Image (tube, helix red, strand yellow):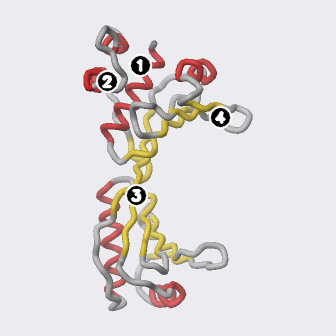
Amino acid sequence: LRHTELLKGENFNPVSRNYLHAIRNARQLRSITMDIVNVVASGHLGREFDLAVLKLDLSQLQSPIELEHNPEDFHGLVIRFNSESFVIILYSSGSYVIMGANSKEKVVEAQKILMNLLLELDIEFESNSPSISNIIYKEDISLDINLNILLTKLGFETAEYEPETSPFLYYWPEEFDCLITIPSSGELVITGTTDAESAKDAVSHLLDVLNS
């Protein structure tokens, strides 16, 4: 049974519950795994900071961190960790961004490390949980894709492909709130969602288009 047959019939409607149910049935057969490439989260410490002073104070700690603060080029204090992939950017307003984490658990870990650094300096702050704003997923569908043909299938209203400027086709599926970046190698990148299920459904939908 072809996966596409699950999506055909008189009740087919791209925005219906039946459609999403069919998508997920097809997805189970396709074994979509989805790797997390990057989790982006943000929070606020409830106070302002003099970043130049904070950088100096942090540099005195016996912690394996790298600090970067060049206010002429960038307003934030960038905190990198020798043993971790994530980066924390702290702004003078007290807001901060966590980037480069490969799981939601790593976001929590990054926040705890930031809190502990400030506690070591006896700095008071509000301990609020960061909110995740974006998760970037990757899925290799192991297909060689003719992007010109795919563009005609997807339609110019929801897809964009300009090989003169970029080797990728960009697809904004109407049924799913995300962007799928598609190279000819089939190594997809899905951005704009914080929900793995939605990302998997979007990939399953794309596979149905490719199989049609």
Are there few (<14), some (14-19), or many (20+) residues within 10 Å of tag 3?
A: many
Which mark's residue is nearer the viewer, 4 or 1? 1
Q: Identify residue type, mark 1.
A: Asp
Number of labelled discs? 4
Q: Identify residue type, mark 3.
A: Ala
Q: Is residue 35 above or below residue 162?
A: below
Task: Tell me the tag on residue 107.
Answer: none
Q: Which residue is mark 3?
A: 101
Which mark's residue is nearer the viewer, 4 or 2? 2
C-alpha distance separating marks 3 and 2: 29 Å
Q: Nearer the viewer, residue 117 or 15?
A: 15
Q: Identify residue type, mark 2.
A: Ile
Residue 139 place in picture, x, y as percent? 43, 35
C-alpha distance separating marks 1 and 3: 31 Å
Decide: marks 1, 2 in contact (CB < 8 A)?
yes
Which mark's residue is nearer the viewer, 3 or 2? 2
Decide: marks 3, 2 in contact (CB < 8 A)?
no
Task: Tell me the tag on residue 167.
Answer: 4
Q: Which residue is mark 2?
A: 23
Task: Tell me the tag on residue 208.
Answer: 1
